[in-house]
Amino acid sequence: MAVPSGTRDQGAMMTLSAGSRIGLAGAAVVGVAFGMARYAYGLTLPDIREDLGLSELVLGPISSATFAGYLAGLLLAGWLAARRGARAPTTVGGACGALGAVLVTFAQPPWLLAVGTVLAGSAGGWVWASYSDVVTRSVPRQQRPRALAIITTGTSGGLVLLGGLAVLAAVGSWRLVWAGIALAAVAAAVVNLLLVPRTTPAARPGGRTGAASPAKALWVPAAYSIVYFAAVVIYFTYAVDLLDHGTLPGAAVPVLYAAIGFSGMVAVATGALARRWGSMRVATLCLVTVGAALVLLGLADASLIATTASACVFGVGYMTGSAVLAVWTAELVPDRPGAAFTGCLVVGAISSVAAPALAGAVIPGLGLETLLLLTAAVSWLGGVGLLLHGRSRGPAGVGTGP
């Protein structure tokens, strides 16, 4: 009996080791691509405007182009994975993040700044959903929720590092932020190549009688994505705006990012929470939490303590909300988790584009604080909708949606 037992223990250790390796590598790449490269443009925008003497007519379109780069990465990742394997998009994403950050670091003409920021912004699109396929191909089923949660929570670490780089930039140059991102992207890409196994392209699943279509299976998480991403982008857009135009010290912006990153690390437990309570209930709690953070921010009244408290609450809802979406879509469409996650991210991306445009139209009449409170109400209503849907389906349907 001792030999079989030892063999089983050894196998379990190897399983955990493989899941941990992929989780850590994925967290590093996602942390740099999504937590750093994707948010660095907004963080350094005031200094870029002053140093390069660029107007909003130039900087605004560049900001929109970075989002277009993210969407392009999302849509092209699946195409590349189908031809080169699930790891290939993560490699391309790491390279885009590194090259884009280098170009921005040395940018002088606006076109070079634009090319660099678009490349860097595309990195998050290339890598995030791709890891759903990597995990499915390389990690046993019972370990997948934990691995996906670890990978997504890498964004928290990236935000913490970005906050640290912002402090360095305050005493030096905004270019230090982008130089640090370039170095981090190279390091993460190397770790990814060393720890994540190369996979062959997955065969397309054949038709199965009675199988629900992905669109039908994903309509609830897609609806969640619309509300969640709209609330998140409003928070990120106008939290920094409040700090820049308020009476808080300049160091408040790095503190905000660091607070979001540190508190968001609790999202590593998302897989366990989803198993215990169900993904839909966890998603409901995330919408409620993000709404609470928006209320705190709207009522902060230039208080550093209240703003920091809001950032800590937001970090929990933001990171857990991202992680549960990865877990949820993998549960609902286990044969094509990357495509399922990508679909919800694209829906969320469209919502992220529309929400700031709508906000910009109503702020002159309502005021920023009122907008934040209304967004919180929408987030809470979304949570109520998920809760009611789960109850209408009974205990068996609460965890996984339709």
Image (spheres, helix red, strand yellow):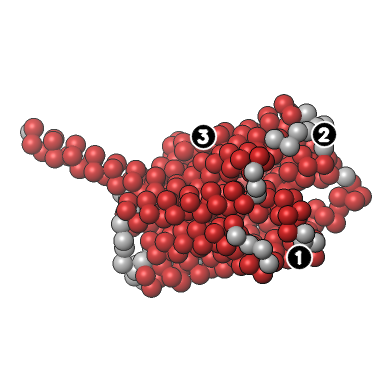
Sequence-earlier tag: 2 or 1:
1
What's under tag 3, amino acid-wise? Val
Q: Which mark is residue 141?
A: none
For discs 3 and 1, the disc positioned in front in the rendered view:
1
- From the viewer's side, name the closer residue of 33 and 187: 187
Give the CA separation, mark 3 to mark 1. 39 Å
Residue topped by disc 2: 247
Residue topped by disc 3: 266
Of helix, strand and loop, which one carries label 3? helix
Residue 389 visible in the current orientation: no
- From the viewer's side, name the closer residue of 400 and 113: 113
Disc 1 crowd, CA 10 A, few/some/many (<14, 14-19, 20+): few
- Residue occupying image coordinates x 65% and y 54%: 41
Horizontal side of residue 70 vs 63, given as left or right? left
Sequence-earlier tag: 3 or 1:
1
Pinpoint residue 106: horizontal percent, then vertical percent: 60, 60
Examine the image and state in which quarter residue 345 appears. bottom right
What's under tag 1, amino acid-wise? Val
- Residue occupying image coordinates x 82% and y 41%: 245
What's under tag 2, amino acid-wise? Thr
Residue topped by disc 1: 58
